[in-house]
Image: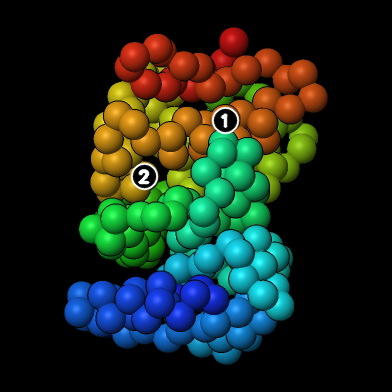
């Protein structure tokens, strides 16, 4: 039974999520503010956290940043009423693995949570994952070590969130191949959120800002109407 921490200062939202998750056979712990959430995630062994951005004591972005700084690697699904691209980027920058705008459909939240949990299980058990004896993957001046989950561009190491790393690894392992949107959604999230979803575009944009900064040549290329590919210029 997966253990889920739900952190939201709205008692109605918190209670509704707790009831819905228990009906799906999750073990649920709740927190009503950011300080309580951070204390819980430090002390508990949770499989995932559903984290609201707008909370008292500590906001969700701060909770997420502190958790990542302390190397707490549980998947984080961030909830917020903010819907602009810059708000999404801010959430991803803080270390969230996925981002869902309020108001949301419960079925979509459950699907995203299942996808996050499947990715954790895949990382732990899949025979497709690299071993410590395998060499790093190299495309141009980009080097990715799947076993250590580390990335370099030239001599500079790049810090990536779990989702960013998974996305980059998928692109690197398929270097030169155009991956369709649906394929990427299925491999990374385990769920296709449909043609109106901006999640993939947001992650691609943020990944580009990290690996193509300071005037470095582009590596991630958009194939309009199809998807994305990674190749050295």
Of residue 161 and residue 158, the one placed in the foreground of this image is 161
- x, y percentage for residue 161? 58, 51
At x 34%, y 74%, the residue is 17
Q: Say what secondary structure mark 1 lies in.
A: helix
**Which of these two is toward me, 78 or 54?**
54
Number of residues whose C-alpha sits closer than 10 Å to that of mark 2, classed few (under 14), some (14–19) or many (20 or more): some
Res. 148 mark: none
Q: In the drawing, what numbered circle is on residue 188?
A: 2
Residue that carries the numbered disc 1 in the rendered image? 205
Q: Is residue 95 above or below residue 59?
A: above
Q: Quadrant of the C terminus?
A: top right
C-alpha span from label 2 to label 1: 16 Å
Which of the pair 219/202 is nearer the observer?
202
Q: In this figure, which colouring scheme has been used for the structure?
A: rainbow
Where is residue 150 shown, x and y percent of the image?
61, 48
| Label 1 neighbour load within 10 Å: few <14, some 14-19, many 20+ | few
Q: Earlier in the sequence, mark 2 or mark 1?
A: 2
- Who's the residue at 65% across and 55% down the image? 94
Residue 94 visible at all: yes
Circle 2: element type:
helix
Query: Would residue 28 be found to the left or right of residue 212 on screen?
Result: left
Residue 160 visible: no
Look at 51% across and 67% down and name the residue there: 51
Q: In what quadrant of the picture does the N terminus appear?
A: bottom left
Image spot of residue 173 (x, y percent): 41, 32
Could you say which quadrant of the image residue 229 lies in?
top left
Front: mark 2 or 1: 1
Residue at image position (48%, 59%) is 79
């Amino acid at each position: 039974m997966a253990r889920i921490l739900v952190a939201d200062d709205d008692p109605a939202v918190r209670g509704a999520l707790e009831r819905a998750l228990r009906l799906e056979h999750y073990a649920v712990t709740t927190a009503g503010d950011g300080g309580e959430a951070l204390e819980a995630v430090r002390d508990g062994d949770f499989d995932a956290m559903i984290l609201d951005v707008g909370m008292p004591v500590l906001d969700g972005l701060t909770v997420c940043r502190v958790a990542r700084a302390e190397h707490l690697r549980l998947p984080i699904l961030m909830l917020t009423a903010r819907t602009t691209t810059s708000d999404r980027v801010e959430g991803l920058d803080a270390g969230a693995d996925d981002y869902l705008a309020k108001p949301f459909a419960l079925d979509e939240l459950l699907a995203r949570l299942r996808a996050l949990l499947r990715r954790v299980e895949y990382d732990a058990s899949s025979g497709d994952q690299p071993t410590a004896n395998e060499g790093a993957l190299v495309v141009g001046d980009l080097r990715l070590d799947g076993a250590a989950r580390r990335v370099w561009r030239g001599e500079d190491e790049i810090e990536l969130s779990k989702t960013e790393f998974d996305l980059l690894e998928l692109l690197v392992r398929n270097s030169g191949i155009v991956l369709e949107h649906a394929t990427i959604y299925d491999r990374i999230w385990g769920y296709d959120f449909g043609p109106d979803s901006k999640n993939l575009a947001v992650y691609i944009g943020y990944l580009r800002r990290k690996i193509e900064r300071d005037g470095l040549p582009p590596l991630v290329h958009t194939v309009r109407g199809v998807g994305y590919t990674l190749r050295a210029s």
